[in-house]
Amino acid sequence: MMEKHFVPKADVEYTKADFTSDQMVKWCPGCGDHAILAALLATFPKLHIKKENICMVSGIGCSSRIPYYVDTYGFHSIHGRACAVATGVKLANPALSVWVNMGDGDSMAIGGNHLIHAVRRNQDLNITIFNNEIYGLTKGQYSPTTKFGQITKTSPYGTIDYPFNPGELVMGAQGTFFARTLDCVPTLSTDCMTRAAQHDGCSVVEVLQNCVIFNDKAHAAITDRAVRDDRTIVLEHGKPMLFGKEKNKGLRFNGRQLEVVTLGENGITIDDIMVHDETTEDTGIHMMLAHMGGDLPVALGVIRNVKKVSYTQLYEEQMEEQMEQGKYHNMDELLNSGDTWEV
Amino acid sequence: MAENQIVKKEDIVVRFAGDSGDGMQLSGTLFSDASALTGNDIATFPDYPAEIRAPHNTIAGVSGYQVHVGNHIYSSGDKCDILVAMNPASLKSNLKWAKRGATVIVDIDTFTEEAMGKAGYTADPFTDEMERAYTIIKAPITSFTEKIGEAQGVDKKTTDKSRNMFALGIIFYATHKTLDHTFAYLERKFAKKPAVIALNKAVLTEGYEYADKLEVIHSHIFEVAHAEMPKGRYRNITGNVATAWGLLAAAEKSGRRLFLGSYPITPATDVMVELAKHKSLGARVFQAEDEIAGICSAIGASYAGALACTSTSGPGLSLKSEALGLAVMTELPLVVVDVQRGGPSTGLPTKTEQSDLVQALYGRNGEAPLIVVAASSSANCFYWAFEAAKLALEHMTPVILLTDGYLGNGSQLFRIPSMKDMPEIKPRLATPGDPDYRPFRRDAETMARLWALPGMEGLRHRVGGLEKCPDGPLSTDPENHALMVHNRQEKVDRVANYIPEQKVEGDPDAELLVVGWGGTAGALTLAVEEMNNEGTPVAYTHFNYISPLPKNTGELLRRYKKIVVCELNSGQFAGWLRSHFPECPMTQYNKIMGLPFEVGELKAEFRRLLGK
């Protein structure tokens, strides 16, 4: 089936400033959300879509205030339901570029059901998850991504909840696009968001975001400049999975699992290093990559980007087909169909 | 054929009862369709269990379908003149719905000791007393049908499925009707299975001929009066289909795309099932992952410019409460169809009730007014769905349309309207590029805001659940909140300026005013009409506009010394009226049994109130 683009490209040249709204940004100083907003504002001009055709949809939480700060159409909906609202927006008008912004609690606790179903359907939505591993707007309760054992306001003796990994949820729901980025690396964020927008189908971008007030340094173990290069790996399609300050460490699949190896040690050469294929349909390797952490570097960049006909396209094609072949084309025809009689 | 003694009747009620899977719904539909096509007015009411196929031969598995045919049919009737009982459990659970003297047709082959035991009979049900009270026809339906099946070389399973045709044949004979319509149906339905057509036709004919040979039936042939109905083209329609079509009609008339975001729930599912068929008419149906996603997708679709709807029943409406508040806050048009069923909680999924009224009126956090209207017959679900959509689009507000299981599953004759005669619907669209557009600026008359759609140039704006000021941005200003709360209420109140006044039927000068609302109109109309015909004057007013109420409601109620509010709940509408008109003394007549009103019980109550 031919891929179709329902969002019209326009001959428009925008700058970041064109998308900046006149509303005061009310996030805390130092909050990672500022950087995510900046990345998003830098993404839109790259898309060549008219401002009027962009619609931001959010749920509830700090991150969900974002529609007010972007000068497009926007809907700040209710807690957990952004995916559902966005689904309706896109179904009613497939020409719109629809962006969904949610936090970790919004998307994976109260809105978990809507997230997995949106991903499963592969409707053309661009979902961004701001993952700060805490409920910020309600002042510091543990979320579905809070690290096991962490002390928060509602887990004074440590959480006993095993956390979700959003990437694994996406793979489990047979999602077609998943990328991960850091709030403190806006160029990577913009790159992920741009690629997400280009993807025909449902895209999910997880941004590891710092909540400076209630969960400061939640991601510091991987984001601090001193350790970032060794604790993260930026995946690029078609390239060997190398990382580290010296780019001399790499990932190898040893037949059972992924492991870190060092070029030049124990006879390891570049040929031993796995080459990233974001397009492979089988979720197995992408699941492993999304899962990495601990001894393995946390995967960043586009982890999965698979072609699969989108719900949007399937829906529109069925509509078109029935408009042509369907039995009734106006209400008078339907009203008078079947068994009727004159009195 | 022996000499028939034909009894002319204004109307008769036939009830088909059998095991789920015995085809009772189909027999009932075929009988009602044949009656309608031969000039009778009709109303039907399926009475089916929540289980799909409960254990064979148990009371839990009995499925019923009641058909009322004749002249001027308002409801599916109280008790039946003819009862078909395909097994002992059906007889056991349905005999109470038969009039004394009714014709009771049973498949005597099924009355085995085991089946009678399962039905709870400890002795032979056909006692002398019963034989005196009813005309009982013990037809060997199973064995006759099996003989035909064997002769035609059809397998037992297929043969068993045609048993209902034998019973239908007897009914057609007993009601002085021909088999033509059902033959035509079978030929259409099984066009690719000639063996099935031949079998069913043979069984139907056998039933008809069996009846012809029965001495007892010849004194019980009913001929039902033809209906005197306004000229026009007619069809049979269920309330749920009528609701779906009303929404489609409103979309066509308003020029907006129809969107339905829903989740399956009894007894509302058929609204979605029907709309899902009509992509050629532009219906965009989305089966959501849950009730909340159903309404939230509809709210998103509304923001994007569709005539957005969601359909549900009581428990689903509970789940939609928060999102309804969002639709109130964002002042977006939305139609929520609630096909009410017995509650609370899962309650009685397949039974009818009017107990979601208070939930519809108040079931949201904060002060969240919206429009509530109610349909009052299966056929007029079409017009009330249309009206709900018109009000939503023209007043920029969510509207809850209350129907119920009785209306939704029941069917009625529907005089087919012409779309050119349907009222105009003028959505309040903003003008692209309008420099003065502000999201919450209001029309001076209706207080409705303008609808700016994503994609429109120059009207970019944000909506959401947080309080906004009229120009659009967020506001926590105390004065602004007071103003916006007031404006949202005022907007709904002013809808009263655009709806007709409440009318009184029956004898307007009577001492007693009967008040009803929604799905009970059939039984109430007939009860009032019969009492007036019998010389006991009764006035009657039936509400379809619930919130806001028609402007003359108070003035109308104050004219009566005695008012009785009749409803299928503990008094929710009575409470709503009392909160508006505390000066009017009202009594209540309530029924909370999951069943519609019966004419008999209503008349008895009205007489009691009048001391007669």
Image (cartoon, coloured by chain):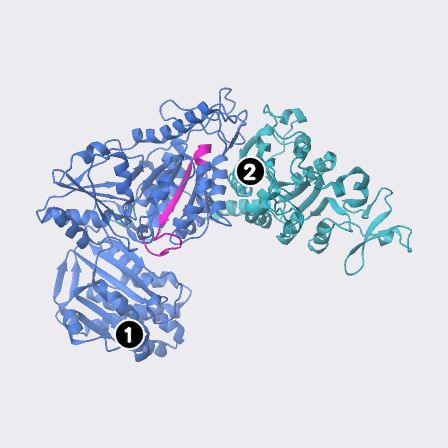
Chain colours: A cyan, B blue
How far apart, in angstroms, are the residues tagged by discs 1 and 2? 64 Å
Is the residue at mark 1 from the same chain as the one at mark 2?
Answer: no
- Please give the chain letter of the residue carrying mark 1: B
| Residue A111 in which image quadrant | top right
The answer to whether residue B362 is above or below residue B39 is above
The residue labelled by disc 1 is B141
Is A258 displayed left or right of B119 in the figure? right
Amino acid on which the number 2 mark rests in the picture: Ile
- Please give the chain letter of the residue carrying mark 2: A
**For the residues carrying marks 1 and 2, which lies nearer the camera in this image?**
2
In depth, the one of B232 and B429 nearer the eye is: B429
Provide residue B172's location: percent of width, then percent of height.
23, 65
Q: Residue at x 72, y 42 (%)?
A: A219
The answer to whether residue B274 is above or below residue B48 is above
- Residue B328 magenta-drawn? yes
Residue B284: in sight, yes or no? no
The stretch in magenta equals B327-352
Provide residue B593's location: percent of width, then percent of height.
28, 56
In depth, the one of A153 and A96 nearer the eye is: A153
The residue labelled by disc 2 is A60
Outermost residue on the top side: it is B435
